[in-house]
Image (spheres, helix red, strand yellow):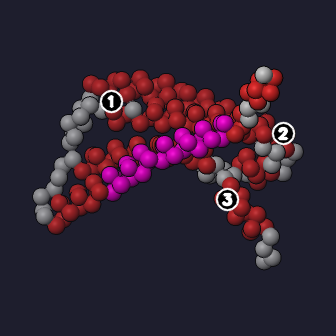
Amino acid sequence: MTDKSNAKNNIDYFKVISKAGDLLEKIVSVPVFVFSIAMTVTVLLGVFFRYLLRTPLGWTEELSRYLMIWMALLSVALCIWRHEHVGVTLFIKKIPIKIAKAIVLFSNILVFYFLYVLTKYGFIMADKGKYQISSALNTTMKWWLMAVPVSSIVCMVFLACKMFLDIKRSNIEEILMSEEVLDAVKREEKLDI
């Protein structure tokens, strides 16, 4: 009985959070991929009908714009999880690891608060959009405007997971960069130029 209770108490929360983040990444990647394909097809249809058949479709430009917004905002969340946002890391790499981790944590808390505000007011904006009708698609703007709060929530989940995992990371490069970028930097640094 004691062995089973010890096994339950020895849950590696870092692995659980990492696997949950990876699963959410796969889930979010699906609509991003679908939106990018749908946007591409929509743009090509618009070009085909406008320039080849000389009978333009009125809805292709608007639909492609809204699909691009959804795709881009959800991609922000993926970039948070993959550590792929642009950042200036020269200064932070020069200071002691504990201070650097504190600065990164503070920065992430500020970003998290910004995402919270974006979510709160994004829902308000989307709710007001239910009274607006898109001109070409003839749909309520609520569903198109929901891209802001939905992506902000996904960003907050990814950022919370990342902040939790950063506790265990002992190398500042692991905190600041994706594994692929980190491997590339390590390969670059070993080159004699």
Indicate the position of residue 153 as horizontal and vertical percent values: 52, 32
- Residue wearing tag 1: 142
Q: Is residue 31 magenta?
A: yes
Please give the name of the residue rendered at 58% of the width and 33% of the height, measured from the top-left corner: 157
Q: Which segment did they paint magenta?
A: 16-40
Q: Earlier in the sequence, mark 1 or mark 2?
A: 2
Which sits in the foreground, 104 or 71? 71
* Amino acid at circle 2: Ile
User: Between disc 2 and disc 3, whose residue precedes?
Assistant: 2
Judge left or right: residue 2 versus residue 52: right
Vertical placement of 121 versus 32: above or below? above
Residue extending furthest front?
1
Q: Which residue is mark 3?
A: 181
* Residue type highlighted by circle 3: Val
Q: Pointers 3 and 1 in contact (CB under 8 A)?
A: no
Quadrant of res 98: top right
Main secondary-structure element of the magenta-colored stretch: helix
Question: Does label 3 or label 1 sit earlier along the sequence?
Answer: 1
Residue carrying label 2: 99
